[in-house]
Amino acid sequence: MGKKETCAVCSGKIDLHYNPMEEWGIDGMMCGDCYSKRVSEHYPGEHIRVNKDLD
Ligand SMILES: [Zn+2]
């Protein structure tokens, strides 16, 4: 069937999918961009690295 994995937030194509936190109320997978955005919105003090270009 070739069902495409798309991000539940931006509907973009997902290369690496991330499971949203339960409290975010998101049904489906998220792309790395949306995931890191959510993380920084919900947990501003914490650094969770999605991209490795911050070194
Ligand atoms: Zn997305």
Image (cartoon, rainbow, N blue to C red):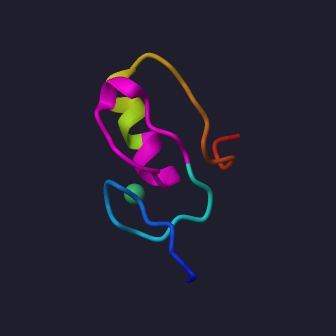
Q: Can you say which quadrant of the picture contains the C terminus? A: top right
Residue drawn at (52%, 51%), measured in percent from left and top? 32
Magenta stretch: includes residue 29: yes
Residue 10 percent across, percent down from the top left: 32, 61
Number of numbered tags placed on the structure image: 0
User: Quick one: which residue is furthest to the front in this view?
Assistant: 1
Residue 53 percent across, percent down from the top left: 66, 50
Magenta stretch: includes residue 16: no
38 above or below 53?
A: above
Residue 13 percent across, percent down from the top left: 48, 71
Residue drawn at (38%, 42%), measured in percent from left and top? 37
Residue drawn at (62%, 57%), measured in percent from left and top? 16
Where is ligand 1, by quadrant? Answer: bottom left
Horizontally, residue 25 falls left or right of residue 37, namely: left
Residue 28 percent across, percent down from the top left: 41, 49
Q: Nearer the viewer, residue 12 or 26?
A: 26
Q: Can you say which quadrant of the picture contains the N terminus? A: bottom right
Q: Which residues are magenta?
A: 18-36
Residue drawn at (39%, 20%), measured in percent from left and top? 43
